[in-house]
Image: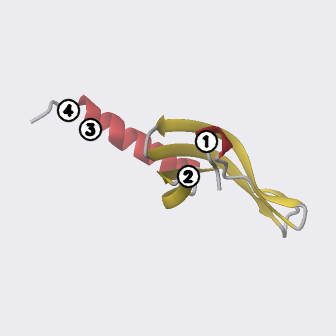
Amino acid sequence: MASTIDEITIEYSEGGVVTTKELAKEVLTKGAWTTILFKYQDWDEKGQDFGPVKYSIRRYQKRNGEYRAKSKFNISSDDQAQKIINTLQGWMQQPAE
């Protein structure tokens, strides 16, 4: 478990092999509930290389001095990421009701 936001990572190793490689991390919110956006790649055993870039939005709750993962949403492709971006930009340009 991580006790600081800086210690939170999506990187994961199994048997000495990095199976999830963190490429970037952006803290979106801080506090008792922290939201982080990660850019990462998963190891492709078949191809013996890292696969395409993916993204994940993860929420962590700090309890008893430790951050614990509570929820996640994985964005599995650049196409899906672009659709999310386009939708949010469109919504933000609309006047508030």
- Looking at the image, which residue is at 34% across and 40% down? 88
The part of the image, by quadrant, that contains residue 5 is: top right
- Element class at badge 4: loop
Residue 94: which disc? 4
Q: Are marks 2 and 1 in contact (CB under 8 Å)?
A: yes
Which mark sits nearer the N-terminus, 3 or 1? 1
**What's under tag 1, amino acid-wise?**
Thr
Residue 67: which disc? 2
- Element class at badge 3: helix
Q: Are marks 4 and 3 in contact (CB under 8 Å)?
A: yes
Q: Which percent across, then down, holds residue 90?
A: 29, 36
Task: Pick the residue in front: 5 or 84.
Answer: 5
**What's under tag 2, amino acid-wise?**
Tyr
Q: Nearer the viewer, mark 3 or mark 1?
A: 1
The residue pinned by badge 1 equals 4
- Looking at the image, which residue is at 53% across and 37% down? 27
Which mark sits nearer the N-terminus, 1 or 4? 1
Task: Give the class, few, some or many, for how many residues have Cα within 10 Å of label 4's Cα (few <14, many ≥20).
Answer: few
* Spatial CA span between label 3 and label 1: 33 Å
* Spatial CA span between label 4 and label 3: 5 Å
